[in-house]
Amino acid sequence: MARGRPAWSFGCAGRKALALLLLVVVGVSALAVDSSVTVEVRWRVLPYQSLSLVDTVGQFSSFSFPLPEPTADSRLQGYSDEENALRIKITSNIPWKLQVRLEGSDLGSSLEVRRHGDAYVPLTETPVILTRGSNGAFDLGVDVRLRFGDSPADPRGALVPIVFTIMPD
């Protein structure tokens, strides 16, 4: 062995072959890593529903409004309508239904409600479905109808708690 030259030297051709082999191994490894990496992301979106009563001032969880004084025409027809008496804002990311019911009232079947433009439904203490919807944001008008003569109580002086409930459909 000659001095100054290591025993394991490859020479110029050997270094080129080693460099080529190293390049091939690194390239194949990079391709193998690139094609074998799988990233899986999962998330769960929980159902969300929001219901609020809307006034010109803001949003509320409870709201009061006086029934209007009946006109001569409304007395002749037997009822008085108040269109858009309530505004309800609903936000949901799932299909929903809106139920309505009375809570402890002696008005009997004197009071009816509807989503603005739909058919009136009588209010009782048993929940009824007022309307349904899909996901999104909705601003609903609720019309109130007061029938005269169905109840011995004076409906104008009565406090009538109406409960609106949003639930999955």
Image: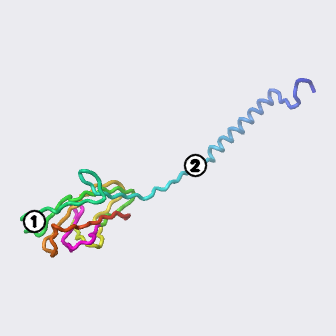
In the foreground, 116 or 28: 116
Q: Which residue is painted at 13% across and 68% down in the image?
A: 79
Give the percent coordinates (x, y) of residue 34: 62, 43
Q: Amino acid at mark 1?
A: Ser
Q: Which residue is painted at 14% across and 62% down in the image?
A: 68
Q: How far apart are the two marked residues, 2 and 1, measured between alpha carbons? A: 68 Å
Badge 1: few (under 14), some or many (20 or more) residues near its Cα, within 10 Å? Answer: some
Q: Amino acid at mark 2?
A: Val
Q: Quadrant of residue 129?
A: bottom left
What's drawn in magenta, residue-wise? 100-118
Q: Quadrant of residue 13?
A: top right
Residue farthest left in this picture: 72
Q: Name the quadrant of the N terminus.
A: top right
- The residue that disc 2 covers is 39
In the foreground, 93 or 8: 93
Q: Quadrant of residue 92?
A: bottom left
Residue 65 lies in magenta, yes or no? no
Q: Is residue 158 left or right of residue 21?
A: left
Q: Is residue 148 left or right of residue 127?
A: left
